[in-house]
Amino acid sequence: MNTNKALAAGVAALALSAASLGAEELNIVHGAVGKDQEVLRAALDRFEEETGHTVNIVSMPERTTDQFAQFKLWLSAGSEDIDVYRLDVIWAPQLADHFIDLTEPTADIIDQFVPAAVQSQTVDGKLVGLPMFLGAPALYYRADLLEKYGKEVPSTWAEMTATAQEIMEAERAAGNDEMWGYVFQGAAYEGLTCNAMEWIASNGGGHIVEPDGEISVMNDKAIAALELAASWPGNISPPGVLNYAEEDARGVFQSGDAVFMRNWNYAYALVNGDDSPIKDVVEVTTLPAGDSGAGASILGGSHLGVARYSQHQDEAIELIRFLNNEESQRARAIESSRPPTLSALYEDPEIGEKQPFIPLWKPVIDNAIVRPAAPTKTDYNEVSSEVWTAAHDVLAGEMDAEAAIGRLNAMLNRLRGNNW
């Protein structure tokens, strides 16, 4: 019997050794906010247990602008250090040459994904990234405060401004000196480009650069949208909002010090978490409308691409398929309120029960507006920089809206030249 046990142990050891010969060490670079890193690590632990591979997370700054700069350095150098990149939704047209075509490796599953997500990652017929999660921003609000002061959920930016002002002043008069009306992403980075595009589009001012490449920003509706936003800092928004990214806004709101907040889906799980001071008193609605009569939300999300410089491409493909399977996407949706890219999961009862926000947000995602990455191609980063610079100058009171829009229009025309 002891001999049999020894033989069995030896066979098991040989099998483990043989398995380990095919094991690889992979690196995934992953910018994160909220619980993203924690949820990713849990998924990677499952992947390691199932495959024998090991995966290291290379962390990045919160702001996508900073991430993109580092990614370009690695990719331009042909670095073999990173196998899988988490890519922002807008990067595919700019980085396509640095990633393998995932069309064939995902042909058996790609029809299960939200079509708009797949389209956003397809450049000249090449699938650059496998959609990981989607996003569209919402207007978060303190339902308890609106009820306390007998206010309706605002449907326009003007209503939001007036309601925020009234509740903020009343709360301060009652002794809450830290209360603000509205927090958003006002720092000079990609997040402000998203906010500015939403203000302008919801006011009927177009998409700054239209899908056909036409520059449309020089109009009175765009100017009026920025003029209203410029009234917020120092009034209903803290002066420091000019340096806020997503987590800065969430920090103020989740501390109980703001009535309204513009933020992405990820924040929902956090503001309603067990340790949140405002748990159970927060609700969300679509972003307000301007003169157009409809709100506008930017399509967001992240996707996973395999670098063509990776020495472990087969294993990297295995990893991105695993991270985007039903189990991984369900866990991500429940734990960090990240909307899935698998269409069927929007009807998943477990997700609907634990994150009711997600099924309700499917129509918003389906109708979200996109940043002009496709028409402006490799010029998009400069385009976005000009947009956020113009918006920031207006918010900071350094330029009036008409002058800033005029300068933006001139800079965009200079960038386009004869063609994008």
Image (cartoon, rainbow, N blue to C red):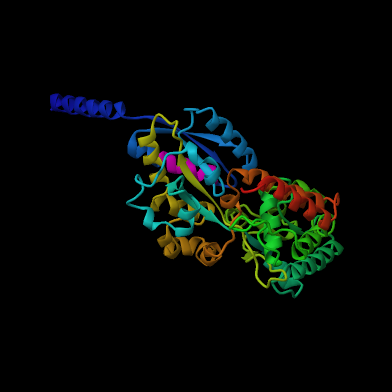
Across and down, in percent, residue 224 comes to: 79, 64
Residue 141 in view in this figure: yes
Numbered marks: total: 0
Across and down, in percent, residue 261 comes to: 69, 59
Q: Where, by quadrant of the figure, is residue 295 drawn?
A: bottom right
Q: In this view, does 387 lie above or below 363?
A: above
Furthest-front residue in this view: 418
Q: Where, by quadrant of the figure, is residue 195 drawn?
A: bottom right
Q: What stretch is highlighted in magenta?
A: 36-45
Identify the residue shown where x is 43% and y is 46%: 126
Is 10 on the left-hand or right-hand side of 107? left
Q: Nearer the viewer, residue 242 or 401?
A: 401
Identify the residue shown where x is 56% and y is 51%: 374
Q: Nearer the viewer, residue 252 or 389?
A: 389
Residue 63 in view in this figure: no
**Magenta stretch: includes residue 220:** no
Is 268 on the left-hand or right-hand side of 117? right
Q: In this view, does 177 lie above or below 17?
A: below
Identify the residue shown where x is 55% and y is 42%: 94
Q: Is residue 347 above or below residue 152?
A: above
Q: In this view, does 109 lie above or below 220?
A: above
